[in-house]
Image (cartoon, grey):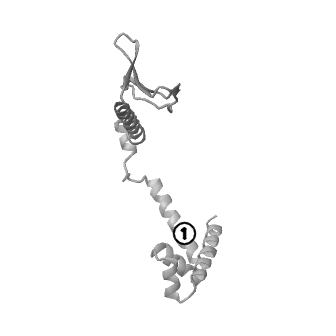
Amino acid sequence: MINKRPKRRKSKDNPYTLKYIETQNIYIVSFKDYKGIIQDVEVSKEIFVSFDRFELDDIKELNEYDRHIEHSEIFEETLNNRIKDKIPSIEDEIIRKATFEELKLAIEQLPEIQKRRIKKYYFEDKTQQQIATEENVDIRAVQYTLNIALKKLKEILK
């Protein structure tokens, strides 16, 4: 009885298949010879394990290749599309500035405490705990204020 080994994907350069006959404790490496005829060669367990390890390493390389190497052709157009520091178009810049101005106006409409805490949290990068400590209040009060302020800002910016 041939032991069922898990089906593994193979590189096109891998010409062999491994088999283990459990009832006879025989390790076999199968391959096609130069005439295309399948040949079975009995090997020792050590050689079988070496072939198996090589096959696993080969699969690892195939997976690595699939995950990390780009498989498309690279043209000047695709490279230009990838530029990280793209110069924003005039339209994009106007929209960004308009959105920022709208946000500033919306924040100005908030009550003083909410406005102050929103500015500290989002623009000064302070943690809720730091704000609570500075203002000598419980952190839950800061969290509540920020949540209410965000709800109001969403309503204002609709």
Q: Which residue is mark 1?
A: 103
Rendered residue at 38%/53% (across/down): 87
Q: Position of residue 128 (x, y in %)?
A: 52, 78
Residue in the foreground of this view, choosing between 32 and 129:
32
**In this orientation, which residue lies closer to the viewer: 17 or 138?**
17
Q: For the residue carrying disc 1, how many other residues have a C-alpha within 10 Å: few (<14), some (14-19), or many (20+)?
A: some
Reply above or below: 93 against 41: below
Q: Is residue 62 depicted above or below 16 in this figure?
A: below
Give SS at disc 1. Answer: helix
Tell which residue pokes out farthest to the bottom in this image: 136
Residue type, numbered disc 1: Leu
Quadrant of the snapshot with the C terminus:
bottom right
Q: What residue is drawn where x is 56% and y is 82%? A: 139
Q: Residue furthest front?
A: 24
Question: Residue 140 placed where, x, y %?
Answer: 60, 80
* Observer-nearest of 128 and 41: 41
Location of residue 107 in the rendering, given as x and y in whole percent from the top left corner: 56, 74
The residue at 51%/63% (across/down) is: 98
For the question of whether residue 109 can be seen, the reply is no
